[in-house]
Amino acid sequence: MNDSVVGQIVARHAEGYKVDIGSAVAAQLDHLAFEGANRKNKPNLQVGHLVYARVSFANKFTEPEIACFHPTTGKSAGFGLLEGGTMITVSLGVARYLLRPECELLLLLSHHLKYEVAIGMNGRVWINAESIKAAIVVSRCIESFNDSKSTDVSGLVRSIVKQVGP
């Protein structure tokens, strides 16, 4: 509960959406689970859209429920529809590493490129950058870090940025 996840809308229904978050069953996302949403003002998400959400309810007997707002403030706090960009999948250990405030990999990448990421505790990472080339560099760095056992993060970033170019 309360973990942030990146999910993909897989179905729409009268009360909301079914969202693939990588669990055994699809999560439920209610139409009203967004900041400022009411019966007349609901988001219009389509199948295939990506969302950044928080797990609001989960147990082994029912499907999980997710919401796109912070529970105490009611504000979106970065949650909601993820427009543009691409999604990659990493190990849960790498997802935890990327979520750390002092994450060296993301810090070094920010010296070379302008980008934004949404990192889910379900191992999914959404990447949006100023160009396709920049998005490729960010995704390659994260995927290479995910696949390698090396601890030389600065060398990894330098080699990929040199390979693809800024």
Image (tube, rainbow, N blue to C red):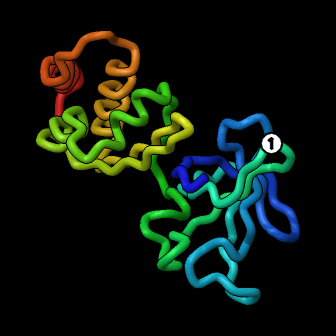
Pinpoint residue 84: horizontal percent, then vertical percent. Answer: 47, 53
Pinpoint residue 113: horizontal percent, then vertical percent. Answer: 19, 43
Tell me if residue 149 comes above or below residue 29 in the rendering: above
Q: Residue at x 55, y 71 (%)?
A: 71
Q: Residue at x 34, y 25 (%)?
A: 140
Q: Quadrant of residue 163?
A: top left
Q: Residue at x 21, y 16 (%)?
A: 151
Q: Residue at x 86, y 63 (%)?
A: 13
- Direction from residue 14 to residue 138 in the image, left or right: left
Residue that badge 1 annotates: 60
Report the number of numbered marks: 1
Q: Which element carries disc 1, helix, strand or loop? A: loop
Q: Residue furthest top?
A: 149
- Direction from residue 22 to residue 24 in the image, left or right: right
- Quadrant into which the C terminus falls: top left
Quick one: 83 or 110, which is closer to the camera? 110
Can residue 41 be seen by looking at this rendering? yes
Q: Residue flagged by tag 1: what amino acid is it?
A: Lys
Pinpoint residue 147: horizontal percent, then vertical percent. Answer: 39, 14
Pinpoint residue 133: horizontal percent, then vertical percent. Answer: 30, 35
Quick one: 117 or 68, which is closer to the camera? 68
Query: For the residue carrying disc 1, how many other residues have a C-alpha within 10 Å: few (<14), some (14-19), or many (20+)?
Result: few
- Direction from residue 161 to residue 16 in the image, left or right: right
Tell me if residue 67 comes above or below residue 72 in the rendering: above
Tell me if residue 43 comes above or below residue 36 in the rendering: above
Can residue 47 be seen by looking at this rendering? no
